[in-house]
Image (cartoon, rainbow, N blue to C red):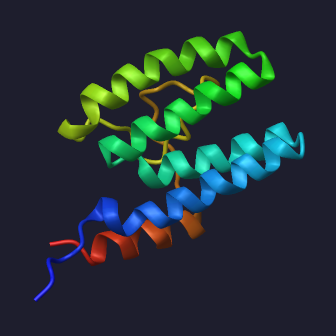
């Protein structure tokens, strides 16, 4: 009998899909669209320390590529928070993860992302 999947394993393909879309948009120089996909990946992955940190690192790289000092500095702070606070559940659900919003602000979740999260959680034990 196989081990039941956990939240991280269930949501990972969706986070990776958003990250792939972000890379594609960046390669086509559609930076705002790329960041929107990074925000989606953040909302989906923020309950998993590994995925949460990974998304913030990708946001940091986006900041480097676009030359956004504000986003770069914001992501340094957020990477530290994601690495140390996520395991304790100290994440503001729905927060999109960019430096344009408070790292403590709870935000509404887009309906399509809420469905993915609900399904990912329904398969965990």
The residue lying at 56 percent from left, 41 percent from top is 96
Outermost residue toward the right? 29
Location of residue 74 in the rendering, given as x and y in whole percent from the top left corner: 55, 17
Q: Nearer the viewer, residue 32 or 9?
A: 9
Where in the figure is residue 70, as x and y percent of width and height? 67, 12
Residue toward you, 15 or 94: 15
* Left or right: 22, with 112 as reference point: right
Count the labels in the image. Answer: 0
Query: Horizontally, is 12 left or right of 33 in the view?
Result: left
Q: Is residue 31 above or below residue 16?
A: above
- Indicate the quadrant where residue 101 lies: top right
Image point (53%, 21%), residue name: 75
Q: Compared with residue 49, is residue 121 higher up or lower down, i.e. above or below?
A: below
Give residue 103's position: percent from left, percent from top. 46, 26
| Furthest residue toward left | 1
Quarter containing the C terminus:
bottom left
Left/right placement of residue 42 relative to residue 4 reads right
- For the N terminus, the image quarter is bottom left
Residue that sits furthest to the bottom in the current view: 1
Q: Is residue 99 left or right of residue 68?
A: left
List x then y, in percent, for residue 9. 33, 65
Q: Tell which of 65 and 42 is nearer to you.
A: 65
- At x 70%, y 48%, the residue is 22
Q: Residue at x 89, y 39 (%)?
A: 29
């Amino acid at each position: 009998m196989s081990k039941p999947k956990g939240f991280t394993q269930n949501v990972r393909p969706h986070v990776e899909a958003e990250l792939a879309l972000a890379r594609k948009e960046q390669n086509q120089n559609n930076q705002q669209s790329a960041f929107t996909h990074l925000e989606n990946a953040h909302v989906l992955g923020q309950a998993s320390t590994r995925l949460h940190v990974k998304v913030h690192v990708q946001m940091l790289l986006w900041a480097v590529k676009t030359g956004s000092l504000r986003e770069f500095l914001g992501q340094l702070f957020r990477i530290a928070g994601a690495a140390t606070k996520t395991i304790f559940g100290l994440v503001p659900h729905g927060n999109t993860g960019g430096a344009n919003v408070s790292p403590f602000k709870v935000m509404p979740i887009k309906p399509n992302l809420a469905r993915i999260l609900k399904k990912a959680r329904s398969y965990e034990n």
